[in-house]
Image: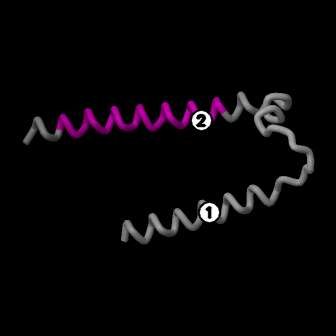
Amino acid sequence: MNKLKSIALTIALCIMQVYVFAQNGNTKTEDPTDFMRSEGKLYVVMAVVVTIVLGIFIYLVNLDRKIKKLEKNQ
């Protein structure tokens, strides 16, 4: 079942990548990071990424504490 999920996720990500590149309508050879910086959206993207990574880190630390507590009780 896990192999099926990983294959489906890989296919979905490939399809999303093609869809995102198809949305690029400007014909200028402008660097995407310059566009994001000029619009002020780069900082929003970075804030979201940092929030997600911190959330995952806090979740893993909390999970580790719970597992250690369960192992100690047994």
Q: Quadrant of the C terminus?
A: top left
**Which of the numbered marks, if any, corresponds to residue 14?**
1
Name the image colouring: one colour
Q: Position of residue 8 (x, y in %)?
A: 51, 69
Q: Quadrant of the N terminus?
A: bottom left
Residue 27 as seen in the image, left or right of residue 49: right
Q: Position of residue 21 (x, y in %)?
A: 76, 56
| Residue drawn at 31 percent across, 39 percent down | 63
Count the labels in the image: 2
Disc 2 crowd, CA 10 A, few/some/many (<14, 14-19, 20+)? few
Query: Does 68 appear in magenta?
Result: yes
Identify the element where label 2 is drawn.
helix
Going by the numbered disc 2, the residue's amino acid type is Val
Q: Position of residue 68 (x, y in %)?
A: 19, 35
Residue where numbered disc 2 is placed: 49
Q: Residue furthest right?
A: 27
Disc 1 crowd, CA 10 A, few/some/many (<14, 14-19, 20+)? few
Identify which residue, 56 or 74, lies in the foreground: 56
Identify the element where label 1 is drawn.
helix
